[in-house]
């Protein structure tokens, strides 16, 4: 699902991501609940990951032709195994050239990894049919402790030169996306939700981010450095996210939602 995020050495991205599948799937259900889907005939999930979001999409548009793309072969293999009746292809969102026109383009937790949103979002809208919707959900958590700690640890160690600029840096707010999309669409709906995911302590928080934000950092390190980096991160996470009396950590996770519906061509 995290398009273009490098895979860490020797593990399965799809398997790691699926450790928290229920929590990661809830936002796409909330997103699609706000999308006009009546009469949808052609739908695609870009950055489909292991197929959990595609499964939700297919359930919501049972009469439509549904497909998925992702840049990760591991993710596509998992999606094909999960939903063998659907078509999944390895493709990068930034160079995806299918013409459509699509009634639904779903981008769940993927576009934060793809640069040049000023070009990309209008290009995606151009692939919509009249009345079709671009449905986007992106984490907006770069200012949360979990990401701040990653940046701090990355600059404080022998790995600093290799980790410079690794973290994603696309930062736009709701106003920016609305202003970009409204001239191109009949309707643009933008909102933000902060989820509070109950996780089993600091170790679970680290495992969560091994399936997303930690990946590009770990991919740049050797085995010994990777172990040291993760341990330092775990120690700092335990301080930043103190556990409740029963050992649970509530992980705040803000996400930005966009539903842009195209009018007459």
Image (cartoon, grey):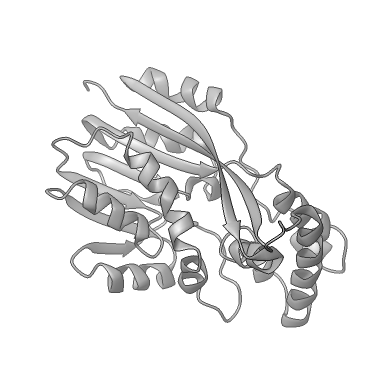
Q: Position of residue 170 (x, y in %)?
A: 61, 41
The answer to whether residue 245 is visible is yes
Q: Position of residue 18 (x, y in %)?
A: 46, 67
Residue 210 against residue 61 in the figure, above or below: below
Q: Residue at x 25, y 43 (%)?
A: 99
Q: Residue at x 47, y 73 (%)?
A: 15
Q: Residue at x 18, y 45 (%)?
A: 42
187 lies left or right of 242: left
Residue 75 against residue 237 in the figure, above or below: below
256 lies left or right of 33: right
Q: Camera-side residue: 5 or 96?
A: 5
Q: Camera-side residue: 49 or 146?
A: 146
- Residue furthest to the front: 245
Q: Residue at x 36, y 72 (%)?
A: 78
Residue 260 against residue 61 in the figure, above or below: above
Quadrant where the C terminus lies?
top left
159 lies left or right of 46: right
Q: How many marks?
A: 0
Quadrant where the N terminus lies?
bottom left
215 lies left or right of 159: left
The answer to whether residue 3 is visible is no
Q: Camera-side residue: 35 or 171?
A: 35
Residue 97 against residue 51 in the figure, above or below: above
Q: Position of residue 43 (x, y in %)?
A: 23, 46
Q: Position of residue 141 (x, y in %)?
A: 63, 44
């Amino acid at each position: 699902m995290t398009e273009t995020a490098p895979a860490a050495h020797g593990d399965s991205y799809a398997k790691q991501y699926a450790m928290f599948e229920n929590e990661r799937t809830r936002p796409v259900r909330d997103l699609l609940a706000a999308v006009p889907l009546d009469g949808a005939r052609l739908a695609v999930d870009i950055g489909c990951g292991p197929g959990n979001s595609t499964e939700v999409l297919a359930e919501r548009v049972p009469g439509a032709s549904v497909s998925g793309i992702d840049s990760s072969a591991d993710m596509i293999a998992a999606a094909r195994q999960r939903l063998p009746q659907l078509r999944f292809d390895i493709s990068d969102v930034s160079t995806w050239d299918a013409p459509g026109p699509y009634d639904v383009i779903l981008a769940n937790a993927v576009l934060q990894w793809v640069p040049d949103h000023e070009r990309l979002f209008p290009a995606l809208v151009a692939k919509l049919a009249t009345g079709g919707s671009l449905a986007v959900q992106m984490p907006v958590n770069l200012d949360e402790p979990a990401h701040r700690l990653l940046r701090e640890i990355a600059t404080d160690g022998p790995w600093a030169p290799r980790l410079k600029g690794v973290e994603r840096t696309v930062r736009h707010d709701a106003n920016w996306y609305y202003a970009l999309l409204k001239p191109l669409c009949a309707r643009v709906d933008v909102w933000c939700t902060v989820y509070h995911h109950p996780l089993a302590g600091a170790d679970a928080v680290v495992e969560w981010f091994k399936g997303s934000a930690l990946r590009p950092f770990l991919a740049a390190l050797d085995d010994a450095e990777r172990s040291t980096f993760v341990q330092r991160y775990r120690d700092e996470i335990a301080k930043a996210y103190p556990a409740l009396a029963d050992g649970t950590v509530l992980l705040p996770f803000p996400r930005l939602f966009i539903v842009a519906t195209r009018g007459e061509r």
